Image: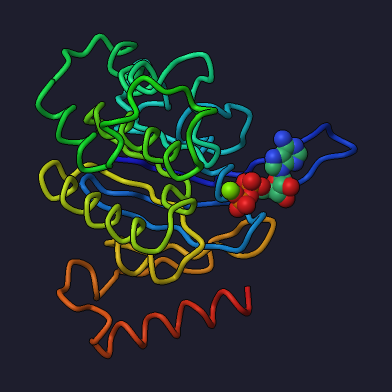
Amino acid sequence: MIDIKDLSVHYGSQDNSVLALDQININIGKGEIFTFIGPSGCGKSTFLYVLSGILRDYEGTVLIDGRPVDPKQQRIGLILQNYGLLPWKNVRQNIVLGVKIKGQPREEEYFDYILKQLGIDQLLDRYPKELSGGQQQRVAIARAFLLKPDILLMDEPFSALDAISREEMQELFLKIWQDHHVTTVFITHSVDEALYLGSKIVVFSSSPGRILGIYENPCFQRDNLRYHDEYYQMSKQLRNLLDKG
Ligand code: ADP
Ligand code: MG
């Protein structure tokens, strides 16, 4: 589904350039959830900018279903780290924006369901500046989910939420994923979150981002996963790798 070959990204001009991503190779299969962990500044957001088509100046090849990234062709749900809400549009307008641009029919029932689940059904007439960080994050999540995308790209989407809300959102995400099996790239800096959500886990090195390891997650979709020995082992292995990287 997503094939990435020798992807490198530089920022800045030739004599003053910063290498942000270094020779990334990865294949993401249809219906999988890949969680990416890595330290701050290692290029996680940059990676998502490339996959979403926002950043086009890179080396290597990035193909989605055999074709270059093109948000006009592919239905991509994107949740940016800074939420990406339009300040002059209210919550309702921000949420339906993606569906509107795509010319998709509005699914009222699904709209109501998502908003209720996200706890933002009372906020529809507010503007982004009248919302807390966590509420803005929920609006961005609603917009991406409502699109029923083929690919869901999420950049630390639950980071502004308190612990309880974060767990609720993780549950909701998995529930929706079970219904639609949307191919997902999920960026996080939490080993726990990576292990809870990912079918596969990718570990990035510190800057410039290189891939230190790609792991099948033995804990994926397991009940009470934190009680299994594999969880403990995996968690230890990932933390070790991050410490060294
Ligand atoms: P992460 O999301 O993992 O924290 P980023 O992808 O945001 O990392 O950034 C990767 C690296 O690229 C960092 O060293 C950052 O300082 C640098 N960087 C990001 N955006 C720019 C930019 N527009 N110009 C120059 N350097 C940038
Ligand atoms: Mg980032």
Residue placed furthest toward the bottom: 229
Quarter holding ligand 1: top right
Q: Tell me which residue sits at (50%, 20%) in the image.
A: 86
The number of numbered badges drawn on the structure is: 0
Q: Is residue 238 left or right of residue 106?
A: right
Counting from the top left corner in percent of width and height, residue 53 is at 49, 27
Q: Is residue 182 left or right of residue 210?
A: left
Asked whether 177 or 137 is in front, the reply is: 137
Q: Tell me which residue sits at (42%, 23%) in the image.
A: 126
Counting from the top left corner in percent of width and height, residue 222 is at 17, 73
Counting from the top left corner in percent of width and height, residue 139 is at 37, 33
Q: Is residue 30 left or right of residue 74?
A: left
Looking at the image, residue 165 lies above or below residue 193: above
Colour scheme shown = rainbow
The answer to which quarter of the image holds residue 42 is bottom right
Q: In the rendered image, is residue 10 in sight? A: no
Looking at the image, residue 239 lies above or below residue 130: below
Looking at the image, residue 199 lies above or below residue 138: below
Asked whether 42 or 161 is in front, the reply is: 161
Asked whether 125 or 113 is in front, the reply is: 125
Q: In the rendered image, is residue 37 in sight? A: yes
Q: Tell me which residue sits at (21%, 30%) in the image.
A: 148
Residue placed furthest toward the right: 15
Counting from the top left corner in percent of width and height, residue 158 is at 42, 51
Q: Tell me which residue sits at (31%, 82%) in the image.
A: 231
Which quadrant, please, contains the N terminus? top left
